[in-house]
Amino acid sequence: MSSQSADPARPDDPKAVHAVSGPADLAGPVGPADPTDPLARERAHLSSSRTALRTMREDVESLDIRDVTANWVNAEALQHQISERIKALADLSDTPLFFGRLDYLHAPGAEQAEGAEGERFYIGRRHVHDAAGDPMVIDWRAPVSQPFYRASKRDPMDIGLRRRFGYTGGDLTAYEDEHLSDPAEAATTSKLLQQEIERPRVGPMRDIVATIQPEQDEIVRSGLAGTVCVQGGPGTGKTAVGLHRVAYLLYAFRERLARTGTLVIGPNRSFLHYIEQVLPALGELEVKQATVDDLVAHVEVRGTDDAAAAVVKGDARMAEVLRHAMRSHVTMPTEQVVVVRGSRRWRVPAYELEDIVRELLERDMRYGAAREALPQRIAHAVLVQMERSGEAPDDRVQDAVARNSAVKAAVKEIWPPVDPAKLVLRLLADADYLAVHADGVLTDDEQKTILWARPARSVKSAKWSAADAVLIDEATDLVQRTHSLGHVVLDEAQDLSPMQYRAVGRRCTTGSATVLGDLAQGTTPWATRSWEEALAHLGKGDAVVEELTAGFRVPTDVITYASRLLPHIAPGLAPVASVRENPGFFELRTITPGTGGDEGDDGNAQVVAACEELLRQEGSVGLIAADARVPALTEALSAAGIAHLDPGEETTPERRLTLVPASLAKGLEYDYVVLDEPRAVVDGEPDERTGLRRLYVALTRAVSGLIVTHAAGLPPQLA
Ligand SMILES: Nc1ncnc2c1ncn2[C@@H]1O[C@H](COP(=O)(O)OP(=O)(O)OP(=O)(O)O)[C@@H](O)[C@H]1O
């Protein structure tokens, strides 16, 4: 950071973060800024931007729609739009209106002609303009904002000065400059950026809009047409990147996506709860969130599968079985159809009906669509005969023939309606039926594995499992095409089965997807082995796979320890390199039950004591334990009088401890973590590899420090 600048008063220390000690009253009127004090000038700009935003909001609030709307429905819709707009224009006191500034060397788009004037842009969460319509703050997603994230000394992108702002509460208290086009200035790491990354975590996930990194920005700003898959270790910002990509796409393709819709898919409710504030903070209120289970909820899920059955039910070959079973409902006609109209009888012979049915089957239409087309086709055959005999029937006649009872009866016979849930029920309950449709697709053993031990009698009484619901969803799609959205973000994708990928894929057949995951964190028996395979199941085989390796969450000492597991759980994956400067702390602590002469002491009080130690620090604390250990630890916590939260519940300055069953830890993070008994976490899973992966997830949730407590021996892979 050098000292050449358009800014006349830039102090000399090239690497300094310039700061003031006390916050200024930015809300009140600000006098003419001291021209020699750049910070005062920036604060004046903040103040006038806030005033401009207030005026924008007041303009919208004062809109009188009585004269422009003809009826109350329109008025209602318009009023809704207006109140959404007012909400979007709110000035949130603790969210900086802008966080950066770019001074271009030339006017953007002016072909960089000699003498063209540079322009200055303030970069923020939303666009703000003054009374004349001139921009005071530019939306971070606008093309002119891009160099804020991407420009470097090597490629300055026509930027003379990049300035980052530091805030304390809502007050602008510091700035930091980089003169990207100045060859004399050395490239350095931004201190403000570093501070932002190191900031303690309390409350739900927050946006990273001020500090998106170049490799992340490439993913955020990739176009709507293509699907992007991001492989990245723990804390590399996959979730953050996925959410910011949605915000970017909504900005760049607003109209199209408003029509087609966007959806974020996460692994469970707690996770969705944890991330739900990010998009609204970026001004995007319309994005839906769901789990895969929510998407396929055609039946009530009350049952579970053992791992072996779930693996087979989640296998893509099940799609073939279902398709076969669905099509088996079509029976070739053996009799003619006779349509009586007035005094005449029209006959469509069986062989002609057969041709129609064959043609529909070959066209590979949805079962339901073909079923609707069939009566029209039969009616058409009748119409051709009418024309041949000199009549001139029109469309209405064709419709009437299609609705004729003889035609309806034939259609019911040939192409009967199919209830998707009943179809799946029969496959799982009836060994002979399954054998017919799985022949050559599933082995005898596999068929036995998925058959119900006690066959259910009805859709209502069946104890459907999550995997069954996905099968029903697939069958539903065979009957009727699933509605496709414009864009889908799929987080923690590594845990999906091939059938689940298909379920997500059919919700974006006409759109695109952002697929986020980490092969090393796959903890389902069917976890993804390769992204190529997964993307093929999703129907997005041409997606690009990007890799993120810089870690923003886990400190070096902790990630180094956790990475010992990598060769055992995902050989070939590169360990995450932490970008945190604070090395954090990491401690292995042996718990000794029965200390102090108390025979009944199970050692849990010592785990609780570790939590109490960490609660003395600022920020959130997570106690992560094998699911089976949760009841005992709950008891120990309440015995010590410590209140705790469940995962996904918002931490507040008063309640900062969350007790997290290892099975729900994925995607979450806490400033400090106590990881209870690694051995139990591993043993809680059906096989060792899954157990070690679960442990890897649990070990990588801490932002500032980790204490691993153990009474049993540690898994040897950690040695
Ligand atoms: N560019 C950035 N600037 C500041 N913080 C960042 C940046 N990128 C990511 N982070 C922070 O790092 C943490 C981890 O990010 P995130 O949860 O998106 O990672 P992840 O790859 O999804 O992790 P996991 O694999 O564990 O689910 C979050 O607190 C996020 O805000």
Image (cartoon, grey):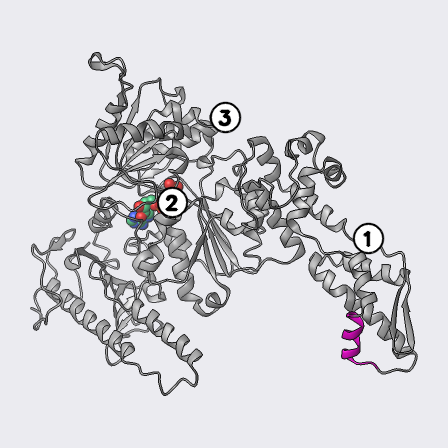
**Magenta span includes 449:** no
Residue 139 versus residue 55: which sits nearer the camera?
55
Residue 27 versus residue 450: which sits nearer the camera?
450
Q: Which mark is residue 331?
A: 1
- Amino acid at dot 1: Thr
Q: Which residue is depicted at the point 25% across and 31% down?
A: 638
Separation of residues labelled 2 and 1 (CA atoms): 48 Å
Which class describes the residues within 10 Å of circle 3: few (<14), some (14-19), or many (20+)?
Answer: few
- Amino acid at dot 2: Ser
N-terminal-most mark, 2 or 1: 2
| Residue 672, horizontal then vertical, whole percent | 25, 36
Q: Is residue 545 above or below residue 630?
A: below
Residue 93 versus residue 510: which sits nearer the camera?
93
**Magenta span includes 395:** yes
- Residue that carries the numbered disc 2 in the rendered image: 270
Mark 3 vs mark 1, foreground winner is 1
Separation of residues labelled 3 and 1 (CA atoms): 46 Å
CB atoms at circles 2 and 1 under 8 Å apart?
Answer: no
Q: Is mark 1 on a helix, strand or loop?
A: loop
Q: Residue 220 carries which label?
A: none
Residue 235 figure quarter:
top left
Which class describes the residues within 10 Å of circle 1: few (<14), some (14-19), or many (20+)?
Answer: some
CB atoms at circles 2 and 3 under 8 Å apart?
Answer: no
571 horizontally vs 393: left or right: left
- Residue that carries the numbered disc 3 in the rendered image: 687
Mark 2 vs mark 3, foreground winner is 2
Q: Tell me which segment is drawn in magenta.
A: 393-403
Q: Is mark 2 on a helix, strand or loop?
A: helix
Q: Which residue is depicted at the point 33% across and 26% down?
A: 632
